[in-house]
Image: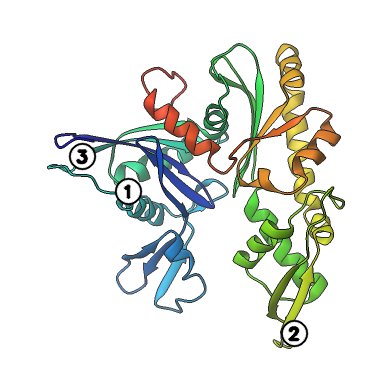
Amino acid sequence: MGLFSFTQEIAIDLGTANTIIICDDKVVVDEPSVVAISTADNKEVAVGRKAQQMIGKGGTMIRTIRPLRDGVIADFYACEMMIRGMIKMIPKQTRLFTPNIRMVVCIPSGSTEVEIRAVRDSSEHAGGRDVYMIYEPMAAAIGMGIDVESPEGCMVVDIGGGTTEIAVISLGGIVSNRSIKIGGDDLNMDIVEYMGRMHNLRIDEPTAERIKIHVGSALPELDEALEDFVVIGPNKVTALPMTVPVSYQEIAHCLEKSISKIENAILQALETTPPELYADIVKRGIYLAGGGALLHGLSKRLTDKITIPFHVADDPLHAVARGTGIALKNVNNFGFLIR
């Protein structure tokens, strides 16, 4: 970016749980999708990790908001404020003029016209002059190094915070897809509900997220057993402190229902896949991306259930963002980008 550069190009993976911004081929922002707003004047107080640390601690003075729910914008004003705040986090470079911003933003493959318009409007209000959009499974495939313009079919399963995106891709287009509102947030809520019901322990979503990271499992028996994770919290009835060790076997049991829904959605996407592309998928396997792909034992469970090999991306958390960054450099060559 030079002294007289008038355009800044950024790629945004606008996720329910995390927002990642890529600029000049580097991840420059990787923050939770949270914004804290003052109730007194409706102004932004903090964005990202700082805002996340305020959850449940601001009393009546500060509202902490997650602007995206189930992969789509739930709070338009808060989303615009969050995008604007995260763009300010990009390291500044010497320039005489405020640059125009060209953005590529990724969206769920099941987005309606209204939801697409909401993302475009939020991006434009946050400073975007030239806004393109790309579907998340397409971005994930590009980020994993798959040639999406090849006639050979591939299937990508992107398990994000709010949605699971399943798509069969061939010749630069999505041939068949399923988008279900099951993701990491639902797994967290399953854990919150389970801990309250089985252990009489009251926990919040950040604690559930830590439990999921440490002992979250898709299988009740793993090749390498995980150590129990100790949770401290109040008893739901007496409010007295409790210390509860949690095993991966019980978390596998409590996540069973949500993971079964993901399995069924993958099978439904395979049902609508043309036979020629189905044969390609059986040969190449199915690719897993998104934070949910890191769940212990998930790829093995899906491989055993569907009898097609499942491959986890090298860096599943950043696969969509990397693909969005590649799309940014090829806006004139990729005909599948949405304007």
Q: Is residue 45 above or below residue 98?
A: below
Residue neighbourhood size for the residue with mark 1, other residues' Cα within 10 Å, grouped as few (<14), some (14–19), many (≥20): some
Select label 1 or label 2 by which is in front. 1
Question: Which residue matches tag 2?
Answer: 237
- The residue lying furthest to the left in this view is 96
Q: Is residue 332 above or below residue 134?
A: above
**Label 3 is placed on what type of residue?**
Pro
Q: Quadrant of the C terminus?
A: top left
Disc on the earlier residue, 1 or 2: 1
Task: Find the distance from the CA under tag 3 to the CA under tag 2.
Answer: 56 Å
**Label 2 is placed on what type of residue?**
Val
Q: Mark 2 and mark 1 in contact (Cβ < 8 Å)?
A: no
Q: Is residue 107 visible?
A: no
Select label 3 or label 2 by which is in front. 3
Q: Position of residue 72 (x, y in %)?
A: 51, 46
Q: Position of residue 130 (x, y in %)?
A: 30, 32
Task: Find the distance from the CA under tag 1 to the CA under tag 3.
Answer: 13 Å
Q: Position of residue 183 (x, y in %)?
A: 65, 48
Question: Which residue matches tag 1?
Answer: 90
Write the residue at 45% across / 66% down. 64
Q: Quadrant of residue 214?
A: bottom right
Write the residue at 55% across / 37% down. 319
**Label 1 is placed on what type of residue?**
Ile
- The residue lying furthest to the right in this view is 221
Left or right placement of residue 336 versus residue 6 in this view: right
- Identify the mark at residue 182; answer none if there is no mark: none
Q: Mark 3 and mark 1 in contact (Cβ < 8 Å)?
A: no
